[in-house]
Image (cartoon, rainbow, N blue to C red):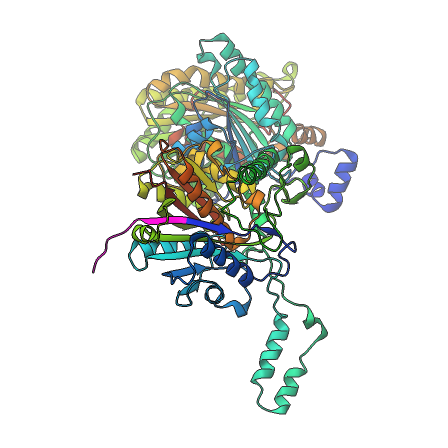
Amino acid sequence: MKSNVRRVAVLGGIRIPFARQNGAYARASNQDMLTTTLDALVDKFGLQGEALGEVAAGAVLKHSRDFNLTRESVLGSKLAPETPAYDVQQACGTGLEATILVANKIALGQIESGVAGGVDTTSDAPIAINEDLREVLLALNRAKSNAARLRAAARLRPQQIVPEIPRNAEPRTGLSMGEHAAIMAQEWGITREEQDELAVRSHRNLAAAYDGGFLDDLVVPFLGLERDQNLRPDSSLEKLAKLRPVFGGEAGTMTAGNSTPLSDGASTVLLASEEWAQAHDLPVLAYFTAAQTAAVDYVHKREGLLMAPAYAMPKMLARAELELQDFDLYEIHEAFASQVLCTLRAWEDPVFCQERLGLDAPLGEIDRDKLNVHGGSLGAGHPFGATGGRIVAGLAKSLHELDPARSGRGVISICAAGGLGVTAIMEAPSNG
Amino acid sequence: MADRYSQLINTPVGKVLSKQLGLPSPVTLDRYSPGQPVISGPVLLGAAPGGKLAKSVAGVLAAVGAQTYTALADEVRNAAAAAGLDAKVFSAEVAPSDQTFKALVFDATGIASSEELREAYAFFHPTIRRVRTSGRIIVLGASPENLRNPRQAVAQRALEGLVRSIGKEVKRGASANLVYVAGKAENRVDSTLRFLLSPKSAYVSGQVIRISASPRGGEAIDWERPLVGKVALVTGASRGIGRAIAEVLSRDGGHVVALDVPGQERDLSEVAGLIGGTTLALDITAANAPVRIAEHLQENHGGVDIVVHNAGVTRDKTLGRMSEQLWDVVIGINLTAQEAVNAELIERGTIRDNGRIISVSSISGIAGNAGQTNYATSKAGVIGLVQAYASPLAKTGQTINAVAPGFIETQMTASMPIPIREAGRRMNSMSQGGLPVDVAETIAWFANPASAGVNGNVVRVCGQSLLGA
């Protein structure tokens, strides 16, 4: 058996603008958005009727009928129906984890090309029937005699009409992700001002990316939306300072301005072997060269819920034989401004790096001017499953446009519910 | 056990009353019981830039498993990392007001001028109101007498005023102490820090402790039973403070030779029986007492490691009414006998390497007390004894220290007239009397083999009494 590992090329990606919850996409389903975005990718790269190696994508909030969401989207798309597909679900890590899965198959020669993607809607969210009611209905269904049916039906109660609405809370702590992030912010001494500054930069960088045309071939309009609905180009420290804290109590530092809003959207990325790219006459924007997923025990060991990327990074760097400073671009998902700042602070902290990460010295500071240069989730919004694809596509294009004299490396860090973290490295073709 | 006033004040009705009337409100002080962690609650560690103790202190905090916080400042974070201390971050700016600490520990050795005392202000200002009940404030400084730079010496000396005032401000059973550490003694702070952090130092506040360099100490030690294999002589061991000393030294693993006058033999046997020690009944003022003690220790134990001079008496009278005999008895038992026993044990080499002489002085010996000219003279003499012997003993790797108890709840204080007793109980930062065990724990800290750098100290166990401050 051959076991040559091949280089994995990122050929590009596309997404629809992200909408705020109950905004422009209030009536769009996950399948609508994912199919549309797949078709946009097909159009961009001329893949009509093409049978790809696979499509891996997923959503965090899913209806039970969407058990085969990605395959159904492929069937509804312009791709050949012979393209296999499967769903991936790893909270906010979904999009990047899907990319890793497709990339690994390409690297191992199991497939030649593939699409990774993700989608989420918080507007068209699944609402389940009341748990008590569900039990009664199942009992009714099991009942074999009229008497048994009557007995089961007698358990129906008016209050069972109240449905189960999905909550943005960690099942094991009962705290929302924002509350967890507020604990982290406090544990790392992150101030309101720092968070607001990061938020302002995110909006301004994203606005500049739109204005400068960087996003022209990365975002395709959908349902009348041309830019991300959450984007506030005129965002300022003064305006953000007026917002009331939403997490961490009255004295908290986290507001709706420095936390990502619930949002809707989808993204897709095309990956391939170099041979496939050449055969299709598609330029390689970047290579997907390393990845690492990590998890932390936020329940018993009390590590911060969103600190897992801080653990994933040094493992990946060690394997890639790189330092944290060896990158031209850093894409750190801005679930909350505080999450980004906690992560950076942890990497600079001798205690954290030595005691928690087991390193000899801190990973150190990064050049903040290289961070989320075309905006981040605070500006764009964060449809959970779609964020990974947004970042991979954006970073691939940024690396492609980099001055060849630079190192040509970019790194991605994404935190996710359940104490998960996903990181990856991408490199420009000029980089060896 | 708490006195009646304390019991009353700590009832729901009493709490309301004491608040309305502005009465002293003593809390029930945390006290140590075996198996307890050194400190039960988070510790905030701070350091003025340029200090040299943060790493040692962090090492102790790591060793005792203290949940520690520091500011996000490079120096202190590096010190913590180097010491293997997984310290969390504390930022006064964003910390919720209900985040509190069991102890605030501040390395002030970096403070080199009066302007830089601002560092101490900056550390304590946002944190002093976050100290829990029975909390601890520990400031570590550089011994001013060893500093060549006058400005640095001035600033370091100034810390005494800060710490003593903090002790008076913190209330609710919290204590504040200052530890001056000499150069090259940085790695001799562990036994002292453990003592001050723990409930063992419940009634020790407003004290200045000096740690000097020592060739001894630093050996591996079982902190639960540091005195295993050690022999301790305790005079006046049949009751009160002496009995508590015998119990605590025995708890710490030492073999106690309990000494008292023949008239106390029944109580003495009871104490020795309870703690698995042995007895030696004799009158320490007898001419042959020093020789008998030395021979007893030599023959039965091959020597002695810890000598605790606790035996003492009071014979109160104002000086004009005091008979010659009252004077002589007190000086003889409280001071001359100690001198004679020490001289004999030292002369014969009965006290082993890394040995300890520990005397019980009194705040009367520091502050003086009307009606106690004889007693205060003897107890001030005990301080003189410590000071005279500290340096020569250090050369042989031994130490001599004294405790100076304040108002301790014993039979002796129980027989005082009520106004004097109540004044003694309440006129201190803890608003209550101490217990014999508080004196005993302090002695056990001196006795610890790791306390080799603690020499020539007189530490008051007085709840920061207003007397003789």
The one nearer the camera, B233 or A419, is: A419
Q: Quadrant of residue B399?
A: top left
Q: Position of residue B108 (x, y in %)?
A: 50, 22
The one nearer the camera, B17 or A282, is: A282
Q: Quadrant of residue B90?
A: top right
Q: Is residue B22 left or right of residue A311?
A: right
Q: As displayed, is residue A18 above or below residue A330?
A: below
Q: Is residue B311 visible?
A: yes
The one nearer the camera, B42 or B440, is: B42
Q: Position of residue B94 (x, y in %)?
A: 60, 36
A3 drawn magenta: yes
Q: Residue lying farthest left?
A: A1
Tally of numbered tags = 0
Q: Is residue B389 left or right of residue A6?
A: right
Q: Quadrant of residue A425?
A: top left
- Can you say which quadrant of the picture contains the C terminus of chain B? top right
- Can you say which quadrant of the picture contains the N terminus of chain B? top right
Q: Is residue B241 left or right of residue B407?
A: left
A17 drawn magenta: no
Q: Position of residue B3 (x, y in %)?
A: 65, 39
The secondary structure that dominates the magenta segment is: loop
Q: Is residue B233 visible?
A: no
Q: Residue at x 68, y 68 (%)?
A: A162
Q: As displayed, is residue A100 above or below residue B337?
A: below
Q: As displayed, is residue A180 above or below residue B458?
A: below
Q: Position of residue B9 (x, y in %)?
A: 71, 41
The one nearer the camera, A320 or A352, is: A320
Q: Residue at x 30, y 60 (%)?
A: A110
Magenta range is A1-11
